[in-house]
Image (cartoon, helix red, strand yellow):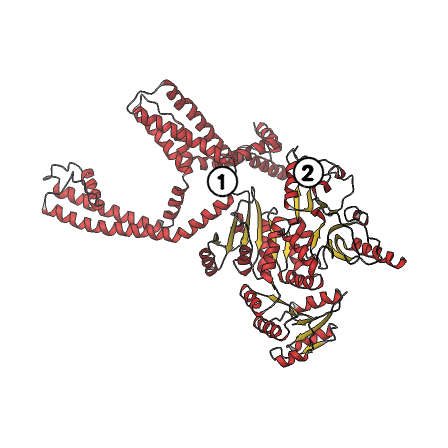
Amino acid sequence: MIDSRVFLFGYGNHGKPIARGLSEDGFYVVIVESDEKNSQQAKEDGFEETYLVDVTNDEHLIKLNITPKDQLVCVMDDEHLNVFLTLSLRSLFETCTLLSISDSIHTTQKLKMAGADKVIDLYEVSANRIHSILKRPVTTKLLEGFVGDRREISFKEFVISEDSLLRGVMSDEYRFEQHGVLLVGMIDQELGNNFIFATAGVNHKLDAGDMIVCLGSEENLNAFENFITQTKKRG
Amino acid sequence: MNQWVLKIALILFRSNRYKAAKSFVRGILNDTSNPYKKYVDLSIIFLIMTSIAILVYQVKHPVPAWADCYDIYVVSAIFLVEYLLRVWVHSDITPLVIEEYRQSEFLGKTFHAAKPLKHAAKQKMEYMLSPSAIIDLLAIFPAYRPLRILRIFVLFRVFKLLRYAKNISQFTHVLSSKRFELLTLLFLLCFVVVTAGVALYVIEEQVNPDIESLFDAVYWALVTISTVGYGDISPVTDAGRSISMVIIISGIAMISFATSVIVSAFSEKLVELKEDRIVEKINKNKQFVIICGYGQMTKMFFAQNDDRLQNYIILEKNPLKVHEAQKDGFDVIQEDASRYKTLSRFNVMHSKITLLCLTRNDIENIYITLNAKSVSPKIDVIARASSREMVKKFERAGADHILLPTEVADTMIRTAISHPRMYKAVHAILAGKGIARIDEIRVLEQDMICQKRVDEIDFKSFRLLFIGIYRGKDHPFMFIPSKDEIFQQEDVLLVMGQEASIEYFKDLYQRGGR
């Protein structure tokens, strides 16, 4: 499912948890650092492919052997360096997906101008989080960090395989509740790659290659996943 | 006699009804945050106004009998009741008696009711001698019309209005802060007026036909020094005119001095008065948000707000930042949120308050959280923490929600990479911006849905996805509850769906419905 590598520039405050999370999700993470201490730390934490390079030097960046499929994530601790790095990476590797983190309002704009595909503004996401706490306290608490480690209920996506039990099932009729999960929505390849919410009122036949997103407790979600794979083995 | 007092005290002490009644009366008379006080105030003001109107009218016209009756019996009676209630709620007698009884029990003495009663009487007396109480007492007397002099009592009804004019009390409060300067000035004024008056009396009493007594001379001196100068009495000798010149000049000096003292007192207090206004305004709301700190997070919080948050107040202790917030057009006061006094100014009893601790500093945020919880556990606290290690501490301090900006952002990046499509969809749900959203429906007692079984409600026909029930902090969240679970009062239902579906559902099932 995952064939691309993630190049993580920076292994500091943000880099560390992100690297851990991504490798948990099954990504191959390459760490690039300009700080010796941080790169040492990365190696100790088990990231074998860690490069200690001068990120301001284009030649060094080219040597990293980045392919167009790779995703680049800039999370350097130094804001200025982060903007500079985003700019250099964009000019060197035009087709790669490039994500950056921003620690202040002023930097967000600059990162966008530098060419980042997506900028996560620390303050913006937090401010949004506060709003959702104020408006929907229960939901927010329940789903806090919906892919983090400490949630009660979370979302998970499943891809319907060729021989899955769910293949050919009508989405509105199947009782997902019996597995302790709820169907939130699906991405159907026939209807373009758009996300269709279960509440949109479309009764849809699940085909191989469709992706469904379910809500449930971790335990139930895993059981549900097993349920699907088990059928696959038998078939 | 002792036993009787004790018996009555015990009965009252044990009676919850008595306590409730007393605290209710106390609330409507004295507690500005009490929602009913407004109506009591308004009716008292109405009584005062009508009674003054009758007085003014009767100067030239005969008054109809019913108006007389109303003025003498109704208004006076209500004022009498009000006065008695005020005396009643000012202090409690029963706890004093009970305490004395316990002590004498403990020490093995015989119980005497005299001591606590004396103490209580002293407390009541203290109240009765306060200016506002005296005004209230005198305002009870009706204007007995045949005796013209008694009309003066109606004036006390006018004074009674002062209780409701907040500006006056603020004015006196401001002036009292300059007590020393003003007293000095007053003393100086008396000195000059009396000296000049005596001097004029001695010099001109024989020659000036207008001056017949020392009172005339002192009256002249005051009229002159204040630069009013009626001219009904004026000096006729050169010596007398010289005195006039001197006191006119000193009068100008004194007036400008007095003006400057009062102006400076006000300019010093102006900020405080303004902040009081802001706090007062916010306290009238049933629900509001207190934001501690005006930093990047707070600015972003406001920037991200589509339907501008109405009821909020910002507390910031750095004067520069306060100034910045004012310039940006926010309601801000310069206060330290970690002080007990600051937070207790807010209407914690009657409003639902949410406190946002958004400063950069963990130590400060924890301190503010603890402070808020000690002022009232009812305050909802949303605190910002810098790292995961801090969360335990914030939880211990009682924070209801803990926000980890770095973690939120990190998770966001992680999801954006590992589940890019789901990320968008889920995000839309959470932000409530997309076509589907998760909403919370609170079940109220009178709602149709209350006491219904889960399978009695067909969520699917509303195109809603029923996620679960939240039944307060002490219960675990019920995800996909069983069919025969009953919806209870104060439950929060989590449903997902389009906004229109949710609204339609609420229309049908809330407040009786159908």
Type of amino acid at the residue the image marks with label 1 = Thr
Q: Please state the horizontal and vertical placement of residue B495, each as a whole percent of the image.
A: 69, 45
Q: What residue is at 17 percent from the left and 37 percent from the top?
A: B213
Q: Please state the horizontal and vertical placement of residue A121, each as a whole percent of the image.
A: 59, 62
Badge 2 is on which residue?
A: B489
Mark 2 vs 1: CB contact within 8 A: no
What chain is tagged by disc 2?
B
Q: Nearer the viewer, residue B467 or A199?
A: A199
Say whether residue A175 is left or right of residue B77.
Answer: right
Q: Please state the horizontal and vertical placement of residue B425, each as a whole percent of the image.
A: 68, 55
Measured along the vertical axis of the image, is residue B197 above or below residue A229?
Answer: above
User: Does the rendering let one see residue B473?
Assistant: no
Outermost residue toward the right in this view: A234
Residue B32 disc label: 1
Picture quarter with the N terminus of chain B: top right
Q: Nearer the viewer, residue B266 or B498?
A: B498
For discs 2 and 1, the disc positioned in front in the rendered view:
2
Q: Nearer the viewer, residue B322 or B362?
A: B322
Q: Nearer the viewer, residue A147 or B444?
A: A147
Say whether residue B244 is left or right of residue A158.
Answer: left
Q: Secondary structure at mark 1?
A: loop
What chain is tagged by disc 1?
B
Outermost residue toward the bottom in this view: A59
Check chain identity for marks 2 and 1: say if they share one.
yes
Type of amino acid at the residue the image marks with label 2 = Gln
The CA distance from mark 2 to mark 1 is 31 Å
User: Does the rendering let one see residue B271?
Assistant: yes
Q: Please state the horizontal and vertical placement of residue A106, each as a whole percent of the image.
A: 53, 65
Q: What residue is at 46 percent from the left and 30 percent from the top?
A: B82
Picture quarter with the C terminus of chain B: top right
Q: Tag 2: Cα neighbours inside 10 Å, few (<14), some, or many (≥20)? A: some
